[in-house]
Amino acid sequence: MQGKRILLGISGGIAAYKIASLIRLLKKSGAEVKCIMTPASSDFISPLTVATLSKNPVGIEFWDKNDGTWSNHVEYGLWADVFLVAPLTANTLHKMAHGGCDNLLMATYLSMKCPVIVAPAMDLDMYVHPTTTRNLEILRQDGIQIIPAESGELASGLIGQGRMAEPEKLFEVLKAFFHASDELAGKKFLITAGPTYEAIDPVRFIGNHSSGKMGFALADSILKKGGEVILISGPTKLDLKHPNLTLIRVQSAENMLHEVQQHWSKVDAGIFSAAVADYRPVKAADQKIKKSEDNLTIELVKNPDILAWAGTQKRETQCLIGFALETNNGQEYAADKLKRKNLDFIVLNTLEDKGAGFGFDTNKISILDNHNNFTSFELMSKADVAENIVAYMKKYLK
């Protein structure tokens, strides 16, 4: 941690008192620490304590009312290697999710150039409230790393999830961040995500239930490790922002193939997680098809096999990963697909497993590689699944 520049954002929750211990751990490790406090946070920890431990002035207001000195939120944003907001209260979470800017901490967040990590802390019912869940999901989509609240005794006397992670945990997350942030530096990845929509007419299409969550989680994992990502996504509500990300949105399988063909030769590895429609109408109607007859026949033609194309074009130095979503005989079908499409390994998941498949925030996968190794994982969040897939991929990178 020697010389790493860490900006701490402290908002007004009881857990703010724990930040003193975190600052001490960071300073002992050789890190540079600056802190921004919301006005409310000074009710829980003294700005003098924070300034003394960090060995830097504390930013609270936009300007010093005594001498008129301006606290430059832009300079804070340019200075930091990482911005950790801890504790993250429900109020500050709402502002971050929706662009509120009524204090120095929020102005700095909106100017931030480096990655952001947050550690929520609030009472049990607040933490599990649908509004909180939605706001945390917005932060995830914005590329912010979230350190989940832990279970235990809360200030209200209730026992449950809502406690901010302990200072030692926050310290370990920051250490892991700096270790991982250059793990894939210099490597470039192509990821396909989401469904494809094959037009029947200007209104209707053939598609599937893919949300794109797995592909976006994979992109997020690689970006956090310093890799560069070209993310080619079918129609999805998800979004992701990062300086090393090129996000290309497409509609149909033919659109996706075209973009893959443009970029495949430039990358070190490809992860093809998109649920590409197998067939499309031979001809899409120019105008909306009106309901008339009891039956409507639509002639379909097979879509191009994007993964197979990449497999035929793969260089020896490239790594190629595919996905297989099956309803039965999963391992057998995955093994066949692995061989036919010249993959290094294939990620198998099945709709037979509860909590896996389209639309869920969780997934349960197995990995079959070209050395006939078969590894199964427990049900976990798609973010954790992405971490496991990326970890498995690293041994294939040249």
Image: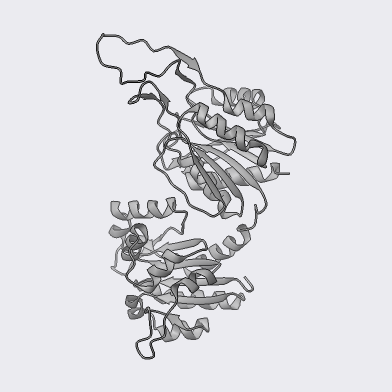
Please name whichever residue, 228 or 340, is drawn nearer the observer in this view of the structure: 228
Closest to the observer, 94 or 89: 94
Is 243 positioned to the left or the right of 46 in the image? right
Q: Quadrant of the N terminus?
A: bottom right
Residue sitting at the far bottom = 66
The residue shown at (69%, 32%) is 314
Residue 296 picture location, percent across and down: 32, 11
Task: Write the residue at 50% across / 77% down.
Answer: 34
Which quadrant: the C terminus?
top right
Q: Is residue 129 in sight in this rendering?
A: no
In the rendered view, does 211 fall on the left or right side of 29? left
Q: Is residue 40 above or below residue 84?
A: below
Colour basis: one colour
| Above/below status of 103 relative to 285 | below
Count of numbered labels shown in the rendering: 0
Q: Residue 235 occupies which quadrant of the picture?
A: top left
Q: Is residue 192 visible?
A: yes
Where residue 362 appears, as percent x and y from the top left, is: 44, 42
Q: Return the x and y of residue 331 as percentages of the image width and height.
A: 58, 26
Q: Position of residue 193 (x, y in %)?
A: 50, 37
Q: Residue at x 53, y 42 (%)?
A: 231
- Going by the image, does 361 lie left or right of 225? left
- Can you say whether 340 is above or below 156 in the image? above
Horizontal side, residue 311 vs residue 251: left or right? right
Extreme-front residue of the structure: 286
- Determine whether 364 is above or below 149 in the image: above
Q: Nearer the viewer, residue 328 or 289?
A: 289
